Amino acid sequence: MTFPRGRRWRVTAHHQVLQPKATAMSRIQAETPLGGPGSSASAGGLAASSVPAVSDVLAGEGSATGPPRQADRLLVDALRASSHPADDRFHRLVQLAQRAFGVKMAAVNLLDDTTQTSLAIVGTPAVELPRSDSFCDWTVQHDTSLVVPDARLDPRFSMKPSVTGDPHLRFYAGEPLAGPGGTPVGALCVFDDEPREVSEDESRLLRDLADWVEKELIHDSDQAQAREVQRRLLPAYPIVVPGYELAGRTAPARNVGGDFFDWQALPGGTVQVVLADVMGKGLTAAVVAAGVRAVMRGMARFNGLGETVGLTAASMDEDLSHTGTFVTMFAARLFPATGDLEYVDAGHGLALVVQAGGEIRMLTSRDLPLGAVPGDRWQVHQDRLEVGDTLLMVSDGILDLFPDVWSAVQAGVALCAEGRDAQEMVDRLAVIGGEGPLDDDITVFVVRRDAS
Amino acid sequence: MNLEKRMQGQVVVLSCAGRLNMTSARALRDAVGTTVEGGSSRVVVDLTNTSFVDSSGLGALVAGLKVARLAGGDLRIAGASEQVRTVLNLTNLDRVLTPHRSVAEASDGW
């Protein structure tokens, strides 16, 4: 979860019933830049993730000798996937290297087992190269710095297409870049179409810059792993509840948080739905979220809702204390035949029912998050989903997109009023973020009771 | 963040000047831990000069609260900004981390 910056809102209402004004609704609709499904943010969505399994990434860690293995390709893919287009850290580093050397071109290149791609490049268009045509291939293979003062005079490189043709390389200096496990995954290089020597000071500078790039790559790899853990927290199977639609989605931030949503069919036809937000970022938050989800699922089969939340808090208390974190959660049990709903709000505050007519009520309480006070208990409240009602749960990342909580609520109401299906609603809410990396994860989870 | 510790009667006041975020949260947690281990479990965290608190900072306050309560004391906060009070309210944490206007008000009755 993140904090709102400089915004003022309060949600203390318990079962507050509000009739949104038509004017406010239309204003929100007008101001809300809703992209269609598959627009910008959905590319960063979990469904589109091409990050390999954590175990695969970890398998890439090991000694820095020998030719790159399959695991390195997966690692390189993970690094590529985790670098957001709007993120110009590597571009700035490359530009710095280019200026420091006073050369025409510089790049951070990543190499998998067959291909070189540029994570960032200045002075020449980015092109994918076969490894055999690449200078950086030598740097990575030998895992040491390479200086080629004049490629035309160097038999190792004089016949490379980039020397005999565009961009007619003569000078190259490169430093290998180690991935998180120490295996070289690419190189930072400066190059030119004029011959050039490199001083000792310049060699040191290039290595310093390469160390900097490595740190950023390791950071991104941690994030990629956190994202993968989070991706695996998604419900493994769709759930079919006759008379209802359920849909959820998480749009992960660049710095992955600990959001998750879950649904679970319980004995007797009851359905448990959960949306939780582990405070904090990165792998720690994602791993804590995995723990909370697993314990909730295990406890739910044999316990009532209040006990399930209490036992989960008790089971996780040590982990939460060690990591200095806590968890806000909205958990509910739906009895499909009647629409009856039991819910617990553990300091989450962002769940509401939008009635068919557009009236809303917040499902909040004064209970604390999990991990705030040892031995705490959670009260179970009652509600009911009538025909056409929608239970809308969001994580607080959504509040980064609206000036205050009521604007966010109204946007949700507006979507419900459009009569979209649940999946379309969550897709639309999740892409409101528009271009650029999100500051915090946004999770949206909808349970709608069919109108007919 | 600059962390200052002073005794005020039976109460230990920890003043956080600057940003209480992921990098400084650990320092606050450790400072509360050391204070409680040293026998003072009544702690006021003064946020008057804290310009920014993120979720890790809030986590440190909650962790400190647990440590202090476990030792039979309490942790109270003073001078929290609107931003911090807003989040305390949304998460209901204001029930256990009541925001006091000043250190004097927070220490009242201790």
Image (cartoon, coloured by chain):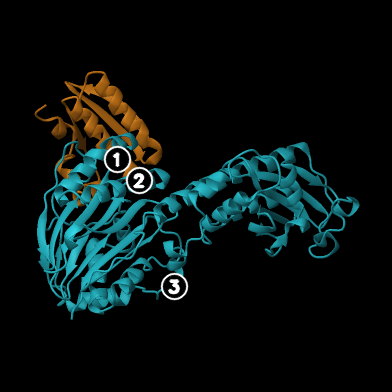
Chain colours: A cyan, B orange
Which quarter of the figure is the C terminus of chain A placed in? bottom left
In-image side of A305 versus B63 (left or right): left
* Secondary structure of residue under mark 1: helix
Position of residue A372 measured from the top left corner of the image (x, y, whole percent): 22, 40
Circle 2 residues within 10 Å: few <14, some 14–19, many ≥20: many
- Structural crowding at the residue carrying mark 1, measured as other residues with C-alpha within 10 Å and reported as few (<14), some (14–19) or many (≥20): many
The residue beneath circle 1 is: B59
Callouts 1 and 2 close, C-beta under 8 Å: yes
Chain identity of mark 1: B
Q: Chain of mark 3?
A: A
Q: Residue at label 3? A: A38
The image position of residue A430, as x and y in percent, is 36, 66
**Distance of mark 1 from mark 2, alpha carbons?**
8 Å
Q: Which of the two marks, 2 or 3, is nearer to us in this view?
A: 3
Q: Nearer the viewer, mark 1 or mark 3?
A: 3
**What secondary structure is marked by label 3?**
loop
Per the model, the C-alpha gap separating discs 2 and 3 is 28 Å
Q: Which mark is residue A61?
A: none
Q: Residue A280's mark? A: 2
Do marks 2 and 3 share a subunit? Answer: yes
Residues B105 and A152: in front is: A152
Horizontal side of A34 relative to A358 (left or right) equals right
* Amino acid found under the numbered disc labelled 3: Gly
**Do tag 2 and tag 3 residues touch (Cβ < 8 Å)?**
no
Residue placed furthest toward the front: A267
Q: Earlier in the sequence, mark 2 or mark 3?
A: 3
Quadrant of res A421: bottom left
Q: A318 above or below A23?
A: above
Front-most of residues A337 and A192? A337
